[in-house]
Amino acid sequence: MPHTILIRNAQIVTMNANEEILHGDIRIEDDRIAAIGPDLDASGADRVIDASGRTVIPGFVQTHIHLCQTLFRGKGDDLELLDWLRKRIWPLEAAHDEESIYYSAMLGIGELLQSGTTTIVDMETVHHTDSAFQAIAASGIRALSGKVMMDRKGSDIPLPLQEETKASLQESVDLLEKWHNHDNGRIRYAFSPRFVISCTDELLREVASLSDRYQVNVHTHASENLGEIELVEQMTGMRNIAYLDHIGLATDRLILAHCIWLDDNEKRIIRERGVHVSHCPGSNLKLASGIAEVPDMLDTSISVSLGADGAPCNNNLDMFNEMRLAALIQKPIHGPTAMDARSVFRMATIGGAKAVGMSSEIGSLEVGKKADLAILNLNQFHTFPSFDVDIISRIVYSATRADVETTIVDGKVLMDRGVMLTVDKDVTLREADRSIRRLLQRSPLT
């Protein structure tokens, strides 16, 4: 018999093709939505959740996260990207051990689940990535993840992060063969070269070949910072996206974080090749990187989704924060109607699902899809009055992560009325502090 959950009397933000807002019940059987409608039969349900006065939304899909960096929250403030990497992030990543990676991942996952994110695209560091996968497996979150790849030698990169090309490729393939499609596809692998300036041409070309062979995503950074773009042009004679296209990486399996500084040719390549852009407004503002031209991308049918990036370049992993920022930062530039609430919510849900190639499985609440969802309590001072106010406006502009009561992934309740069920909060907080203390002793920051 299937395990069945019935969610009763909810306001349901479906994000289906018609973006319908419904009132009624959701029946979950095992990992999928079996029925949506009024007064569904509760017989045989293992659990009935009374969602009267609550709002059910598709779980958020964040398409750019660094779980390995969650321990570094507060350690990278007030720096631009390249200094941030060289002075803080790379030295700390080089100091990681298996235990610190595990608790860094658990700390991030706890925050993500608590704020309604059910799927992430995660980039780890060079070593100990298996520990992050163990945390992902234990927590129940849906994830694409991969070890970061950095085989270009340079004085700025700590020795522990400098890899040999063949070793980096082999370890990535080994991890893929162990973890890809784990737990009925909840966990998937994504090749994760850090960015062009830390990877050789040989490695990136082989990643393109491996992505095609295994039909898996590639997740990397591009055009985040003007200094980065200048270095790429010095190294390759081309701008970032043109180079990635030249070596065969620009396909619909490619997820590019940031893409702030693009020229018209690069936008054309992204659109024609079906490349997916992950917009990270909080990170882009904090690192003073710039503001991506998202309205133009959306107007020209480029696939854009949202991500918080890592904790030390944002200081939180909260999709509510990213949605609000994504909307607000465009308005002084493009006018008050730019980036309306519905467009932003679409990016946070079905847009993310499209980026990871799972729009037929997640990103909306529809019969037959995976039961990945969050239940919100919007009966709060900061979200009222509710009369004659669009529910998506209330979610994007007024709601906060504190309004998430319950998070369900693959039909499993991972947070139940504010109580984490798969991430031990007390243990994770204690071990996170122990871990960062150990890392700082190994790698004092400049």
Image (cartoon, rainbow, N blue to C red):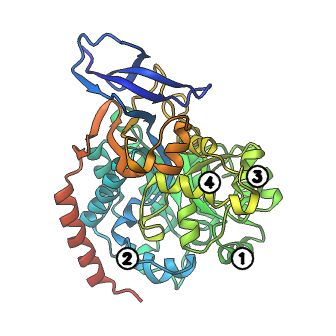
Question: Dot 3: within a 10 Å radius of its alpha carbon, few (fewer than 14), some, or many (20 or more) residues?
Answer: few
Of the numbered discs 3 and 1, the one sitting upstream in the chain is 1
For this rendering, which residue is in front, 356 or 317?
317
The image quarter containing residue 284 is: bottom right
Of marks 1 and 2, which one's residue comes earlier in the chain?
2
Q: Secondary structure at mark 2?
A: helix
Q: Are marks 4 and 3 in contact (CB under 8 Å)?
A: no
Task: Name which of mark 4 and mark 3 comes first in the sequence.
Answer: 3
Residue 175, can we see it? no
Q: Residues within 10 Å of mark 1 (few under 14, many from 20)?
A: some
For mark 3, give the secondary structure: helix
Q: Which mark is residue 230?
A: 1
Q: CA distance from mark 1 to mark 2?
A: 26 Å
Secondary element under disc 4, as helix, strand or loop, is helix
State the CA–CA distance, disc 4 to disc 1: 29 Å
Q: What's the residue type where badge 2 is placed?
A: Leu
Q: Which residue is mark 3?
A: 296
Measured Cα–Cα span from mark 4 to mark 3: 14 Å
Residue named by callout 4: 327
**Pick the front one: 391 or 213:** 391
- N-terminal of the pair, mark 2 or mark 3, is 2
Locate residue 99, reporting x and y percent.
Answer: 24, 64
> Which residue is found at the position 64% from the left and 65% from the top?
201
Amino acid of disc 4: Ala
Question: Label 2, on which residue?
Answer: 92
